[in-house]
Image (cartoon, rainbow, N blue to C red):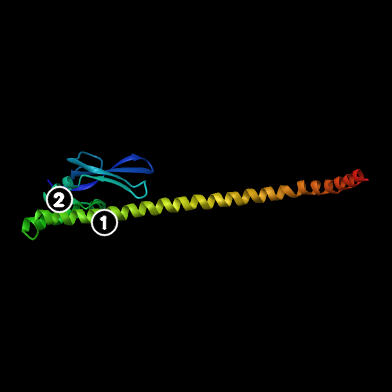
Amino acid sequence: MPVKIRLQRHGKKGKPYYWIVAADARSKRDGKYLEKLGAYNPNTNPATIELDVDGAVTWLQNGAQPTDTARAILSYKGALLKNHLAGGVRKGALTEEQAEAKFNAWLEEKTGKIDAKKDGLSKAEADAKAKALEAEKAVNEARIAANAPVVEETATEDAPETEAEASNEEE
């Protein structure tokens, strides 16, 4: 029975949400599966991926073939790297501790990159909001300035009369 690691679509029309599953290659896209390995939500930025890395590695070691999209997700989360390092341990090129240290170092670096992207996105969003607020303030000031001259003209006409009245009071 050939096993594939693939995506199973859920969610509504235009808002896809996927489960990452290990399934028989002959089963339907959204049909029966052997094990649910995680979830993938492409609607968020960056995309939200929850994955059982150890479960995925177990299926890869047992011969499951990932589809192209599933392979990209497994690579992004480090399952393919962990499988590669496990192969090195089996061959004797690495010890278990060395493989675990390499994987953890890669995972920390990847987490740093993801956090930097999230920070950049939130900063860009804050800058866009600030720019929109400034534009709105400029529009409001222009609207006030357009209405203000009418008020100022009446005030300037009243001012000479008050000066004339003041000079009459002094006499």
Residue 65 rendering spot, x and y as whole percentages: 17, 51
Q: Which residue lies at the image location 36% right of the left edge and 46% below the top edge?
A: 44
Q: Residues within 10 Å of mark 2 (few under 14, many from 20)?
A: many
Tag nearer the camera, 2 or 1: 1
89 left or right, relative to 146? left
Work out how far the residue at label 2 is from the one at label 1, CA to CA, in angstroms. 24 Å
**Which residue corresponds to mark 2?**
60
Q: Are marks 2 and 1 in contact (CB under 8 Å)?
A: no
Q: Position of residue 146 (x, y in %)?
A: 71, 50
Res. 109 mark: 1
Residue type of the residue flagged with mark 1? Glu
Query: Residue 73 versus residue 132: which sits nearer the camera?
Result: 132
- Of all residues, the one furthest to the right in this rendering is 171
* Rendered location of residue 118, percent (x, y): 36, 51
Residue 68 appearing in the image: no
Provide residue 133's location: percent of width, then percent of height: 55, 49
Question: Is residue 107 in view?
Answer: yes
